[in-house]
Structures are given as C-alpha cells and as structure tokens.
Image (cartoon, rainbow, N blue to C red):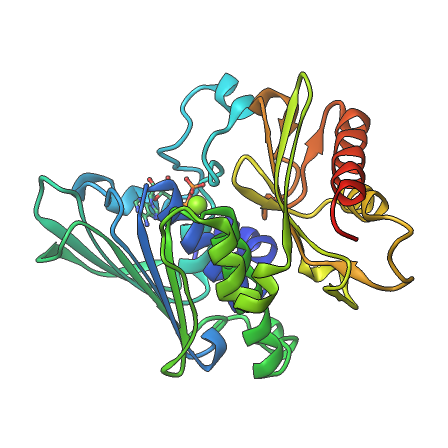
C-alpha cells in the first residue's frame, strides 16, 4: 500500500468504530435517508454500511480511493466554511490501505460500479447492477498492521465504541433512519422522521425520553437547541452528553463544562444529565480542520457560546418543575 495512506490511516483509523464513523459520515454527506450498519464481531470481522444516498459516478470511483481526492470542496476558501462532514479525502484511501474493501455504488441515472481493493491495491473493478446508493464492506481490518490490532480492546469494548459513535451520529441526524446490527442482533433502529426525542428514546429508552426538557437559546451568532434530562434522570458519566455543531458530533471540554455548569448545583457531585445539544452557527466561526478525525474543533467567540449554553440551560431548569 501507499505509504502516505498508511500513515494517514494511523491517525484516522484507530479502531473499528473509526471506520464506522467515516463511512457513516460519507453516507450522511451523500444525502442518504436510510443508513444500515451491519458489523460482525464488533467490526473486527466485518463492517458493512449501506446507504441510499447519491452514489458515486462510475468515473469517480477509483478517484474516491485516492488521497486528498475529495468531491466536497474545491477551492481553498471552502476549507473555512465546510458544510459537509468530510472534506479531507483521507478516509477511503486510509481504510483501503489497511483492510479489504468492497464497494458497490450507483447514481440515479447511471449503471452501478463495483470495486474491490486490498491493502490499497485495486483487485477488481467493473460495472455492477445496483440500486442507487452505496454499500461498502470492510473486512480484515488491520490485517497488515499487527501492532495496531494488538492494541484493540476486548470485543465488548470495541462494540461499545461502535455503538457510541452510531448513537451520536443518529442523535445528530433524526431525519435519517439508522440501524445498527452486530452478529445479527439489532442494537439501534431509528425512524428517520426528524423527531429528536424519539431518537433519544431509541437510544436511552422511552422512559428516559419522556424525562427530557426541550432546550432552545439564541444570540447574535449562535443557536442552541436540544434536550437535557430532568434532574431526577442523571448518569454517573459525561458520555451521555452529546454536542453537535452544524450536525457534526464534536468533543469539546469547555462547552461540555458550560452545559454541566448551567445544569448546576441542583445536581449531586458526580452526576451528569443525559443531553443532546445542537449548536448552529456560521461555518466561518468554526475551524474543523484541526485533527484528521475532525472531532476536535476551534470555535471563535467560544466564551460567548459557553455563556449562551450555560444561561440557556440554567434558565430552563429554574422555570421547570424541579
Ligand atoms: P471525504 O469524505 O473527506 O471527501 P473520503 O475518503 O471519506 O473523503 O471519501 C472520498 C470521496 O468518495 C468523497 O469525497 C465522495 O465523493 C465519495 N464517497 C465516499 N463515500 C460515499 C458514499 N457513501 N456515497 C457517495 N459518495 C461517497
Ligand atoms: Mg469522508
């Protein structure tokens, strides 16, 4: 395989969950309304992501596996106002450099294409019958990077990571019907009807979803919407807090802290709400090109945003039946 691709894979593909994340984000970028994720052995045996999105035109399929070949941005300026989840053109070549990848894809108006790669080398390429959309199957992940394989967690740990990322992507996109299956067991199914509270119910249970407060707050630059659980429904870990910026799941310590602070002293130490917070802002105010996984972002006016989050949540909690 291409050395640069394998180096990039070291950053982009840490574990099966990273593959799932990249493939599902591609499906979201392709305007899919249904995304089905099927893994075997937490993805170590196989990962399949099937979408009904735009598909890849036949003449772009090989290009999609070339490094930095992205169809999503073309001008330098675009990098500062990225609207899609992907933009670096690294995921497919990285994954293909350390696994066996089969992809079938079709656009609405052209015959389909199938491609099979292993270790970055194209083994087969040709016309294939398929319905519009893309199906990608990844097997033998890390077959040529034994050291990486060795550092993976137990199957349960890897499955939890897969499930966690799919949950967060589903929370960020209630308008998309997601399903996740491991070894034939369905772990998630969402309706795709745009109802965030229903997605929360599918993930955390219907009872929990009933104990959520709708949140909305706005200032000149930011709009914050979502749900936080009533104080009687809390968890012992922060991982039940999901933050999304313009539909992208992110990790951000300061924003999480603001949410917890707004939730406030009414909580016992060490307890955290279940929360989903969607932050909408002008893409120019956020830099997502910080790390290859794109989960870390830099926000201008971050203090203003933390203030908005904190006050929005604090105000909502005091006016509600506590
Ligand atoms: P990026 O998402 O950063 O552009 P990727 O390596 O993830 O880079 O994907 C490369 C290209 O392959 C994308 O720009 C897109 O054109 C195409 N592609 C990948 N997955 C899909 C998909 N599920 N549906 C449609 N096009 C896809
Ligand atoms: Mg991508």
Look at 56% across and 53% down and name the residue there: 12
**Residue 3 visible from this viewpoint:** no
Look at 31% across and 47% down and name the residue there: 32
Q: Residue 318 in the image: x percent, y percent?
A: 81, 42
Split into quadrants, the picture shows ligand 2 in the one at: top left
Query: Splitting the image into 4 quarters, where does residue 161 fall?
Result: bottom right
Question: How many callouts does the rendering have?
Answer: 0
Query: Splitting the image into 4 quarters, where does residue 67 fall?
Result: top left
Q: Residue 302 in the image: x percent, y percent?
A: 77, 28
Q: Residue 237 in the image: x percent, y percent?
A: 77, 65
Left or right for 210, reference 94: right
Left or right for 210, reference 105: right
- 14 and 272: which one is in front? 272
Left or right for 261, reference 256: right
Left or right for 317, reference 156: right
Look at 76% across and 40% down and name the residue there: 319
Query: Splitting the image into 4 quarters, where does residue 189 fall?
Result: bottom left
**Residue 198 visible from this viewpoint:** yes
| Quarter placement of the N terminus | bottom left
Look at 41% across and 55% down and name the residue there: 23
Decide: is 34 above or below 69. Answer: below
């Amino acid at each position: 395989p291409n050395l640069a691709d394998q180096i990039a894979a070291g950053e982009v593909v840490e574990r099966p969950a990273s593959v799932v994340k990249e493939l599902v984000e591609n499906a979201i970028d392709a305007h899919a309304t249904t995304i089905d994720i099927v893994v075997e052995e937490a993805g170590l045996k196989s990962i399949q992501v099937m979408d009904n999105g735009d598909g890849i035109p036949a003449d772009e399929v090989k290009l999609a596996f070339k490094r930095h070949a992205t169809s999503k941005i073309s001008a330098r300026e675009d990098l500062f106002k990225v609207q899609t989840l992907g933009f670096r053109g690294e995921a497919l070549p990285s994954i293909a450099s350390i696994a066996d990848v089969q992809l079938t894809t079709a656009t609405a108006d052209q015959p389909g294409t199938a491609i099979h790669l292993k270790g970055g080398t194209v083994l087969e390429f040709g016309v294939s019958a398929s319905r519009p959309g893309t199906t990608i199957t990844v097997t033998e992940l890390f077959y040529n990077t034994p050291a990486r394989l060795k550092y993976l967690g137990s199957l349960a740990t890897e499955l939890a990571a897969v499930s966690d990322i799919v949950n967060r992507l589903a929370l960020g996109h209630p308008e998309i019907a997601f399903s996740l299956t491991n070894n034939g067991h369905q772990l998630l199914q969402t309706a795709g009807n745009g109802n965030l509270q229903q997605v929360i119910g599918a993930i955390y249970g219907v009872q929990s979803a009933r104990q959520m407060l709708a949140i909305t707050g706005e200032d000149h630059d930011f709009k914050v919407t979502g749900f936080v659980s009533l104080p009687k429904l809390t968890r012992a870990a922060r991982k039940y807090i999901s933050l999304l910026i313009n539909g992208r799941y992110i990790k951000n310590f300061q924003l999480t802290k603001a949410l917890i602070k707004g939730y406030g002293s009414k909580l016992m130490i060490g307890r955290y709400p279940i929360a989903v917070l969607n932050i909408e802002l002008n893409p120019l105010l956020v830099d997502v090109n910080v790390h290859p996984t794109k989960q870390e972002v830099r926000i201008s006016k971050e203090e203003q945003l933390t203030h908005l989050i904190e006050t929005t949540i604090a105000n909502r909690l005091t006016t509600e039946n506590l």
